[in-house]
Every structure is written in C-alpha cells, then in structure tokens.
C-alpha cells in the first residue's frame, strides 16, 4: 500500500535533469543550508509532501534530497541539505546564481489528507523535520480538518534544532502543540532533555491513542524504537508512517541501490507504512 499519491510524474525522460538556478541560500546550522531554486521559465513545481528530488551538482554527482518547502507554494522549490560528502558539500557550497540539475519529484508522500478527522502526530529527529515540514504546512493550512496537530522535535543540542525560528512561530499560532527535547544541553536550556521517545506519554496525555496518526522521520534506529513505543502506547501500527532515504541513484527503481527487502525506496517510498517495514527494520545489515 503506497502513501499519498504522487501529484506529478517527472516530465519527459526521468533520467534527464532539468536546469534550475539557485536564487537564495541561507545557513540553518553549522553544517546545514537551505536553498531556494527557480526552474526554467519560472514554471511551477508541484509536489506532494514527502516526495524527493535528485539534485545534481555538475561535475560532481547527484543525491536524493527531500523537498522541504510548502506544497501550496509551487512557485518556489526549497531544499535543506547537510554537508556530509562530496555531492552534498558541493550543493551546500552553491552560491546564488549557481545552476543545478533537478530530477523529480519522485516517490510517495505523507498521507496527511487521508487522515482527516484524526489527531496528527509528527515526530522528527535531527534533520527529519525537513521531509516532514511540507506535511506540517499542509496540515496547518486546514487545522479544523483534524482533531489536533502535535509535533515532537528532538536534536542533539539546542544549537542543532532545525528551523528553530519556525518552531516558535508554529507554537505561537496555537494550531500546533510543540514538544522539543535535546540529548545534551547547557545551563541556558530550560526545556526537556532526553530522547524523543521520552516525550510520547506527555504529548499523548488526554488523547485517545487509537485516534492518532503518526508521521515519523529521523535516523532509522529512532524510527524503529519510536514506532514500536507508539504502538505500545496504543497508536495503531497501520496508522504510522516513516520516511526512508537509502542510497538512491536512479530514483525510478532500475539500479537496485535502494532495494530494501521486496521494495525499492525510490519507487515504493520513501514514505512507508510502519507495519509494512517493522520486521525488516529489525534485521541487522538489511
């Protein structure tokens, strides 16, 4: 069972990148940047929350990067990138005016609209908020369609909280309940300290867990333990979704680099229902 249907199939040859120009770059964290891209002729770029693009740094290579902007703003394409390798480093160092190759959008997204009438729980660890942010935008655009919207955000330290400026705005808007925790903190931090899963009981207090639909994104170990803990608390396993990005090369299910059991992450994901992935997530080296 796939998640939210694709809003747009790649036009023409899905293996051929289109030239996009970087119009703005800003630093989110010490090793993380966000960039805004404009396509040829300023054409709109429609996508579903949770989909990804293949970004190509000419002369270096390409990687899969989740789209992190607002799906209601197809006039701007946003990506958040961590500098961890040759390609991501080249992308992160791209300045205004740099031309990049873009293939996409690809994959299945978060089924936010299909969960109307339920309480949406977003759980993000580290950069996991970037793939989740379009789904949060979509939910906040019509909060009355849901019983409630909750975000649990975790990071290694306060200075590594992604989109910290936006978290405060979301919380102030009162449509979203926000719980933030960090692994390590100094005396200046007055919030919670500990792993993301430690916030589940507090965040779900007074909420019928059977009415919760959870969207979880972060390191695989965090998603595995987080979804299992949510299930123990009564959140149905078939109402939990995770997003996985695994070594995607072709993005159309041909190369086999992202194969995970019987599925190809690029074609069948990157968003999967947790009960479909639970057994595989527990297999070491899979």
Image (tube, helix red, strand yellow):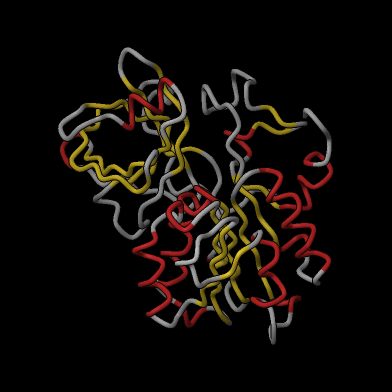
Left or right position of 131 against 58: right
Residue sitting nearer the eye, 249 or 153: 153
Residue 222, above or below 264: below
Residue 67, above or below 60: below
Q: Where is residue 145 in the image (x, y as percent from the top left)?
A: 51, 79
Name the residue: 38% across, 43% down: 80
Left or right position of 142 against 36: right
Name the residue: 45% across, 80% down: 175
Residue sitting nearer the eye, 224 or 54: 224
Residue 43, above or below 101: below
Residue furthest to the top: 59
Q: Where is residue 82 in the image (x, y as percent from the top left)?
A: 43, 37
Q: Position of residue 235 (x, y in %)?
A: 76, 69
Q: Where is residue 127 in the image (x, y as percent from the top left)?
A: 50, 47
Name the residue: 54% across, 54% down: 155
Residue sitting nearer the eye, 78 or 15: 78
Residue furthest to the front: 187
Left or right position of 286 against 195: right
Where residue 151 sits, quadrant-wise, is: bottom right
Picture quarter with the C terminus? top right
Where residue 261 sits, quadrant-wise, is: top right
Count the marks: 0
């Amino acid at each position: 069972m796939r998640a939210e249907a694709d809003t747009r199939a790649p036009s023409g040859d899905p293996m051929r990148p289109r030239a996009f120009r970087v119009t703005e770059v800003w630093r989110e964290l010490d090793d993380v940047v966000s960039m805004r891209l404009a396509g040829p002729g300023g054409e709109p770029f429609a996508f579903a929350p949770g989909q990804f693009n293949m970004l190509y740094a000419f002369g270096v290579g390409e990687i899969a990067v989740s789209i992190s902007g607002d799906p209601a703003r197809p006039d701007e394409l946003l990506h958040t990138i961590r500098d961890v390798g040759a390609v991501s480093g080249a992308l992160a160092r791209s300045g205004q005016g740099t031309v990049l190759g873009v293939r996409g959008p690809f994959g299945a997204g978060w089924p936010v609209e299909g969960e109307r009438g339920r309480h949406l729980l977003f759980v993000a660890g580290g950069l996991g908020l970037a793939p989740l942010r379009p789904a949060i935008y979509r939910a906040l655009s019509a909060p009355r369609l849901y019983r409630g919207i909750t975000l649990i955000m975790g990071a290694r330290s306060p200075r590594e909280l992604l989109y910290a400026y936006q978290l405060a705005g979301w919380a102030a808007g009162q449509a979203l309940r926000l719980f933030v925790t960090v692994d390590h903190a100094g005396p200046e931090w007055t919030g919670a300290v500990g792993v993301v899963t430690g916030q589940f009981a507090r965040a779900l207090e007074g909420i019928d867990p059977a009415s919760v639909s959870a969207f979880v994104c972060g390191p695989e170990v965090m998603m595995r333990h987080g979804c299992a803990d949510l299930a123990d608390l009564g959140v149905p396993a078939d109402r939990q979704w995770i997003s996985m990005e695994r070594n995607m090369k072709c993005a159309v299910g041909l190369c086999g680099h992202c194969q995970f059991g019987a599925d190809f992450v690029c074609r069948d994901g990157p968003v999967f229902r947790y009960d479909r992935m639970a057994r595989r997530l527990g297999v070491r080296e899979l």
